[in-house]
Image: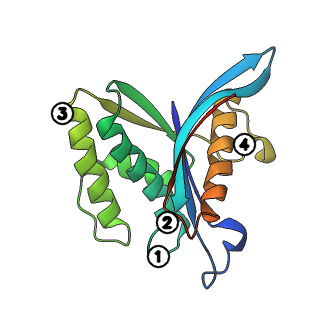
Amino acid sequence: PVYLDGTGGPFGSDYRIRVCGWAWIQPEIGDEGGVLSTLALCGRRGTVPGRQTVPRAETYALLQFVKYAQGGPVGEITVYTDNKGVYDRWHRGPKTTHDANGALCDGIWESYRTVCSRGGEIRVRKVVSHAVEKGIEQDPILTYGNDLADKYAAEGCKDRQCEDMLFTIHT
């Protein structure tokens, strides 16, 4: 599976200095007797171009993953997001929207058509953010993957002066 996240970073509540980061990750998660660890990880992270809002960062993470999927291995891919807006937009389908993130959504569906033409399918599922802190039970692997995406989105905030970063980590 793939996990997405976006964040406003350490100054998320102050729109004047907020720098939003985004990430998508595809981890291989190991489970040794209930202790989860990252065995391998690939993904992409960066700073959101243009308006710095968390909903835009969440949407941009999905756009970047779908663009990546156009040229990657084709098959069924499950994407987990903790953002209700991204989840709802995906399940509404390719309808033109005229809000602040409409152009990003158009890009998602344009790229997704290419994925589908190559025999691929992307399913978007909702996961609870910060489940442990909220005392909400969910599959520990989903919580771990979502927390990992959150960590890399926060790193994306720091990439302000860089292009987005493609990374692969094998541990």
Circle 2 residue = 48
Q: Secondary structure at mark 1?
A: loop
x, y (%) of residue 20? 57, 67
Q: Alpha-carbon distance for marks 2 and 4? A: 25 Å
Please say if 20 is above or below 6. Answer: below
Residue depicted at 28% across the width and 56% down the height: 107
Circle 4 residue = 131
In the drawing, does residue 86 fall left or right of residue 3? left
Q: Alpha-carbon distance for marks 4 and 3? A: 36 Å
Amino acid at circle 1: Arg
Tag 2 and tag 1, C-beta contact below 8 Å: yes
The mark nearer the N terminus, 2 or 4, is 2
- Mark 1: few, some, or many residues within 10 Å (few <14, many ≥20)? some
The mark nearer the N terminus, 4 or 1, is 1
Q: Secondary structure at mark 3?
A: helix
Q: Nearer the viewer, mark 4 or mark 3?
A: 3
Q: Nearer the viewer, mark 2 or mark 1?
A: 2
Q: Nearer the viewer, mark 2 or mark 4?
A: 2
Q: Alpha-carbon distance for marks 4 and 1? A: 28 Å
Residue depicted at 45% across the width and 52% down the height: 86
Circle 3 residue = 117
Q: Secondary structure at mark 4?
A: helix
Tag 3 and tag 2, C-beta contact below 8 Å: no
Q: What colour scheme has been applied to the protein in the rendered image? A: rainbow
